[in-house]
Amino acid sequence: MEKFKVEVLEVEKAFAQRVKEQGIKSGFLAYAAEEAVLQRDGKLICGKKAIEAFFDQQRLEDVWLDWQPEFVDVSAAGDLAYTYGQYTLATLDENGQETVSKGIFHTVWKRQPNGDWRYVWD
């Protein structure tokens, strides 16, 4: 089980790094399973295509997202895992005013048939 925990932590860190380097949309699409679900603003966004459409409608310029996993656990079967920790979201408005929000994230990961981990819930 420890091997799987290390794998999931590494994927979570790579996910966060991709978001930092290539943007929120790129990161969230790269690590989403086809059946992934996002919960945003009290609504569920179901499926990778819907997630892409959601991010296409968002203003993502001058938006920064960072997070660090603080906990990981993996199912006994080694096919599901979850992580949680703290995130920071910062935005600049049209006037250059920065808004920073912090919170707790929770991600559910599923091992794919090819062995890769992809999130199914965020």
Image (cartoon, rainbow, N blue to C red):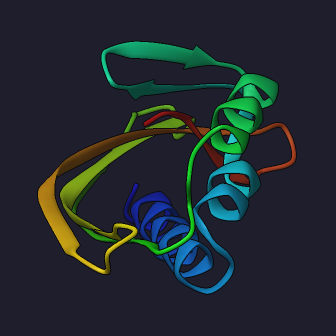
For the N terminus, which image quadrant? bottom left
Q: Residue at x 42, y 41 (%)?
A: 81
Could you say where residue 50 lies in the image, as x and y percent from the top left?
Answer: 73, 23
Q: How many marks?
A: 0
| Residue 55 shown left or right of residue 67 in the figure | right
From the viewer's perspective, is residue 19 above or below residue 82? below
Residue 60 locus on image (x, y percent)? 56, 60
Residue at image position (58%, 44%) is 58
Quarter of the image that includes the C terminus: top left
Residue in the foreground of this view, choosing between 25 and 113: 25
**For this rendering, which residue is in front, 9 or 30?**
30
| Residue 34 seen | no
Which residue occupies 82% across, 27% down? 49
Quarter residue 69 falls in: bottom left
Q: Is residue 24 left or right of residue 85?
A: right
Question: Can residue 3 be spotted in the picture?
Answer: yes
Q: Position of residue 109 (x, y in %)?
A: 51, 41
- In the image, is residue 53 above or below residue 65? above
Q: Is residue 54 left or right of residue 77?
A: right
- Residue closest to the far bottom: 21
Of residues 47 and 13, the one drawn nearer to the viewer in this rendering = 47
